[in-house]
Structures are given as C-alpha cells and as structure tokens.
Amino acid sequence: MTTAGDINFSGKRVLVRVDFNVPLNKEMKVSDDTRLRAALPTINKILKDGGSAILMSHLGRPKEGPSDKYSLHHIVGHLTGLLGKPVRFAGDCIGEEAKKMASSLKGGEVLLLENLRFYKEEEKGDEVFAGKLAAMGDYYVNDAFGTAHRAHASTAIIAKFFPSAKCFGYLIAAEISSIDKVLNNAAKPFTAIMGGAKVSDKILILEQLINKADNIIIGGGMAFTFIKAQGGKIGRSLVEEDRLETALKILEDAKKKGVNIYIPTDAVCADSFSNEAAKQNCGKDIPDGWMGLDIGPETERSYAEVIASSKTILWNGPMGVFEMSNFEKGTKSVALAIAAATKKGTYTLIGGGDSVAAINKYHLADQVSYVSTGGGALLEYIESGTLPGVEAIKK
Ligand code: AMP
C-alpha cells in the first residue's frame, strides 16, 4: 500500500481527492470541521515536500448544476485558517480558469476547485471529465474515505490517468489499516456490536461478520425483529415483518459457525415515540401498546461483560433512541464499556453515522482506538472486502 508518507512530492502538482462535504450553518460557515482537519496531514505533507496541492471535493447533493448553496467557496476562509496559508479558489473545477490556476501553482501553494458535483459527469464516473481533472496534475492522491465506496470520476476513474503516479492519503491509509486490524487480524475474542433502526440495512454486514466474529451483540430497533422471529412479544416496537425469516437464518448460521449472538433480554419501554412518553422497564415480553426504545439494565450489564472480555471490538449503530435523553442509557453504557475496554488494551473501531454521533455525544472519541470518518464506506468495505476508490489506487 503506497501512501503519502512514501512519496517525495517535491515539484509535483498533486491532485488530492478530499472529503470536504462539511455541514454549513445558516451563515454558510463551517459548523463541524472534522473532515477538513482529517485531510490536513496529507495536504501538509505535500506542501512540506515542496509540492503544490490541487484539492478536489464535493459538497452536498446539488441537483441542477452550480448553486451558491453548495459552493466550496464557503469553506475557503476556514481552510485557510487551518492550513495557515492562503487557499486559492477556482470557481469551476474544470475549464480554462482552473487549468491556468493549476499550472501557475508553485511549490507549497494550495488551490481548491469548485464542487465536483456541479457536473453530473462526476457521479456518473465519466472518463472524459476525469481526464480533464487529471490533466491539471502530475500525481493523484485519494484521501476521501467517505466517498471511496463510489466509483465516481474523481474517486476512482481518474486513477487510470496516473498508472504509476498515485497513492493513498494518510486518512484512507489509516481507515484501511483499522478495518484490516478488525476483519483480518483481530485479536480474539472479536465482538461486533450492531445496533440502529433496521435489520434490512445490516443484513449483508451481519452475514460477513458471522464469518469473522466470536460474539455479535444486537441492540437498537433491529433487535425486535430478532425477538419477534423467535416468538417473543414486542408490543408496538419497531419491526420488519418481511425480515423475520432473515433474522432466523442469521441466528441459525451463527449457531452453525459457533458465533454467540446476544439479543436483549429486557428493554426500556415507552407508550409513544417521544422523550416525554410514559416509560417503564419491561422484561423479555413487551406489553401491548408499549414499544422498546432502549436496552434494559439487565441487557446493559450482560453486554458490558461481553465487551470487557473482548480483545477486538467493532461498534456500528446505537442501542436505543439515544437522541432522546430518556432512552440513551443503553447506548451510553455501551460507549463507556468500549472506552474502558480500550484502556485495557482492546482494539476498538467505531464506525457508521450514529455510533460515531453517540461516541462524540459522550466525549469518548479520544478514548477509543479509531473512529471511522466514513459510515457508508466502512459498511461497504466490511460487506465486500474492498471499495472502488481503494481498488483504483491498488491497480
Ligand atoms: P441506523 O442509521 O440504522 O444506525 O439507525 C440509527 C437510528 O436508530 C437512530 O436514530 C436511533 O434513534 C434509532 N433507533 C435505535 N433504537 C431504536 C428503537 N428501539 N426504536 C426505534 N428507533 C431506534
């Protein structure tokens, strides 16, 4: 795996695919700069070597070509502050102006191109468009893990133009080595904790994990499909009736392969989907009219024990509706148990939108081994063992 650390970028104009798809507030200012910060090590390495960086990214999902709402010029000020040097901006990601600005770059200088998705060719993976981007640089670095599961022009197709001048940025390299540690080199026992709303979103990943994990802990709304499939009473809890068979099949496969699957044995129940709802602790069976919105105290304790005895942990998806303070306890206790295990030497990878949001909510991000920056990309990597953006660099 060639990474930015292996290359001397001196004198090179380096096209870097970054993921600057950051949230903007009402004043169009960056409200969370995690993704900008995550790209800094790679950009700084290029500049320090004496290369220049041409940054390419998308922002949001523009539908109808260019619009100010999705313009990357909104982030120029913030990025300038983080880099501590001026960032030039090309108001179109291809065309004469961008070409001119790119060719006049000197070592140590930075150019940010306008939103790639202002061209529908980007998401279509159009080769001509990729070629126009490629023509502006001598070297290609992919550091956008968040979009590495898409075969877009700037994330995968462009690599064809740099058969022997391409590498991974530090962020993608760290993401890959973290997934690899969990999926291919896990210290045992390896426990996967799966939560969130729906079984249907997690079937492929569960099927993969059954071949890798020693323990699979299930929580969140998806647990009720498993409970119902086994004949349990779930009241008005979230359920996917069309996935009951799938849930049984997953349980059967796990048994055949000697994987322990843990399903909640109690729940915090509510009489409506609201933080103000009446609540009570329910045992295995949930009364009619009530819905489970969090794992209960007994489940919390048993999950904490499994976590404490694990040497590798992957966590995706909350244990309950953690956005509501009355139903966050299970998710918080799992997050704390993971942090405590990390302290004792367990390798812990947190990935997938809502578990990352949870670990941040409880200020535990720096107490786990790795927090993935790419939700969808991480899940697809686990499902298929690679990603288009990763393959394109390896070829
Ligand atoms: P996902 O994106 O599939 O990981 O799902 C995350 C969402 O699942 C969060 O917004 C949670 O509020 C929601 N969730 C977790 N547990 C439950 C539950 N018991 N009932 C309904 N929604 C839940």
Image (tube, helix red, strand yellow):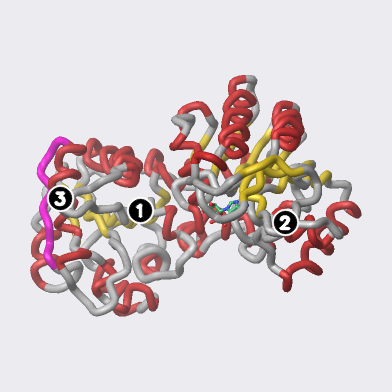
- Taking the image in four quarters, ligand 1 sits in the one at bottom right
Residue named by callout 2: 224
Give residue 3's mark: none
- Relative to residue 179, is residue 266 drawn left or right? right
- Whether residue 42 is visible here, answered yes or no, is no
**Which residue is at a point 55% across and 55% down the rendered structure image?**
273
Q: Earlier in the sequence, mark 2 or mark 3?
A: 3
Q: Is residue 341 above or below residue 86?
A: above
Per the image, is 90 magenta?
Answer: yes
Residue named by callout 1: 141
**Which residue is at a point 52% across and 50% down the rendered structure image?**
352
**Of the residues tagged 2 and 3, which is closer to the observer?**
2
Mark 2 closeness class: few <14, some 14–19, many ≥20 residues within 10 Å:
many
- Relative to residue 179, is residue 97 drawn left or right? left
The answer to which image quadrant residue 191 occupies is top right
Respond yes or no on whether mark 2 lies under 8 Å from ligand 1.
yes
Q: Is residue 228 above or below residue 76?
A: below
Per the image, is 45 magenta?
Answer: no
Mark 3 closeness class: few <14, some 14–19, many ≥20 residues within 10 Å:
some
Q: Earlier in the sequence, mark 3 or mark 1?
A: 3
**Which residue is at a point 29% across and 53% down the rendered structure image?**
23
Residue named by callout 3: 76
